Amino acid sequence: MTLAITPLYAGLIGVLFVVLSLRVSLRRITAKVTSGDGDDKILFKRIRVQANCAEYAPMGIILLAMAELQGAPIWAVHLLGLMLLAGRVIHAVGYGSTPQVVPLRRTGMMITYLMLLLASLANIGLALI
């Protein structure tokens, strides 16, 4: 079996990660900070938004790919992929806003957590069949 769905979501999350990374780089130029955050609160927040994506997205993509490879239904793989993408985008918007929009940040995290849990359970279930 090959991966046909996961690459779509991995690519979209990759684009999101590049956008978040560019926001960090542009702020570094503006703030004239080459390493760390230079006590710049905007740069710190942008670094954390990018890092949060880097912390959660890889595990979600791995779980998504494993579920797809094990033969999870197409609709389930798309649902999980959409949950991961939506969770990361909503979190980035909520946390990255000034001031941050806490309900969006929380919603994004909850969607991401739920995706990780459902994908984990799906992988366990598919492995036992």
Image (cartoon, helix red, strand yellow):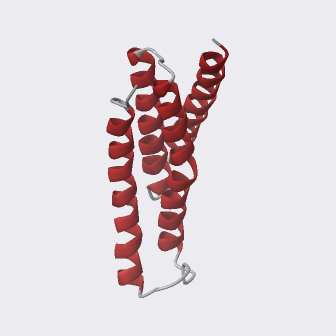
> Residue 60's spot in the image, x, y percent?
53, 39
Query: Foreground residue, 72 or 39?
Result: 72
Residue 99 position (above or below residue 39): above
Query: Foreground residue, 1 or 109?
Result: 1
Residue in the image at 55% along x and 30% along y: 115
Query: Foreground residue, 7 or 97?
Result: 7
Kindly indicate the quadrant of the structure image that contains residue 121.
Answer: top right
> Residue 83's spot in the image, x, y percent?
46, 30
Residue in the image at 47% along x and 36% along y: 84
Count how many numbered circles sit on residues in the image.
0
> Residue 97's spot in the image, x, y percent?
44, 55
Residue in the image at 59% along x and 20% along y: 122
Query: Foreground residue, 78 or 114?
Result: 78
> Residue 44's spot in the image, x, y percent?
54, 70
Q: Give the quadrant of the C terminus.
A: top right
Kindly indicate the quadrant of the structure image that contains residue 118.
Answer: top right
Q: Give the quadrant of the N terminus.
A: top left
Residue in the image at 64% along x and 16% along y: 125
Q: Residue furthest top?
A: 129
